Amino acid sequence: MRAALFDMDRTLVRRETGTLYVRYQHAIGEATRRDLARVMYWVAQYTLGIIDAPVVAAKAALQLEGTSETAMAARCDDWFRRYVETHVCDLGRRAVERHRERGELLAIVTGASPYAARPLARRLGIPHVVASELEVDEDGLFTGRFVDPLCYGSGKIVRAKRLAEEHGFVLAESTFYSDSYTDLPLLEAVAEPVIVNPDPRLERVAKKRGWRIEAW
């Protein structure tokens, strides 16, 4: 069996969803302009490939300590409907359908949380989500920590391999769509890397290696 794996931000969704989420929080009175500026700074670092992802993730997770997992899932459903769905790429939808017609396993593989990715997965009919998992205690509350490894860089390979082992596909025979240089480890691990709306560093690598580049 083959699989088609899709990054989320700037791939299936044209925008960076972290920024969209803070805009949503600002609109409902839960975030300040300073919060928005901080997230935009992190996004800029991410785009340049200089972000310290574990440090940023730890700060983000700590802010959620004591929050209900159920409440977060409901909030992300509302956020997706109001702020994200309009940015879902039509060409991304078509790519998902092509792979579905081929009988391939479909999965979103993203550094975001599963609560952010699942509404998109449901909308596109993608049955599997591989994401950065937040630790939840026995009362259904976030502890303020992520579960290692983060679904970022080499951590994406670890988590994608777990999915492959569980569902019986071969990662080295699969396809992965991504925009980001930080996804280079997983792009190098698949048979068919597809570069979508790439950041400058990934675009240079893709051109050098002759990888397919698409604009969604």
Image (spheres, helix red, strand yellow):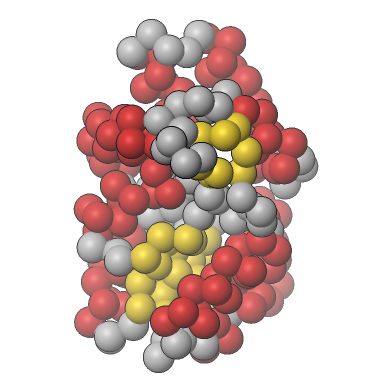
Depicted 106 relative to depicted 36: above or below: below
Residue placed furthest toward the front: 138
How far from the left and from the top, in percent, is residue 92? 33, 60
- Residue at (33, 36) in percent of width and height: 70
- Residue at (45, 27) in percent of width and height: 67
In the displayed structure image, the side of residue 209 where residue 97 appears, left or right: left
Q: Can residue 142 be seen from the camera position used here?
A: yes
How far from the left and from the top, in percent, is residue 177? 48, 66
In the displayed structure image, the side of residue 204 where residue 104 appears, left or right: left
Which of the image's four quarters has the N terminus?
A: bottom left
Foreground residue among 193 and 123: 123
How far from the left and from the top, in percent, is residue 19? 48, 29
Quadrant of the rendered image containing residue 207? bottom right
- Residue at (55, 44) in percent of width and height: 135
How far from the left and from the top, in percent, is residue 112? 51, 46
Q: Can residue 60 be seen from the camera position used here?
A: no
In the displayed structure image, the side of residue 151 where residue 96 appears, left or right: left
In the displayed structure image, the side of residue 76 where residue 153 appears, left or right: right
Depicted 85 relative to depicted 30: above or below: below
Which of the image's four quarters has the C terminus?
A: bottom left
The total number of labels drawn is 0
Foreground residue among 212 and 72: 72
- Residue at (62, 28) in percent of width and height: 62
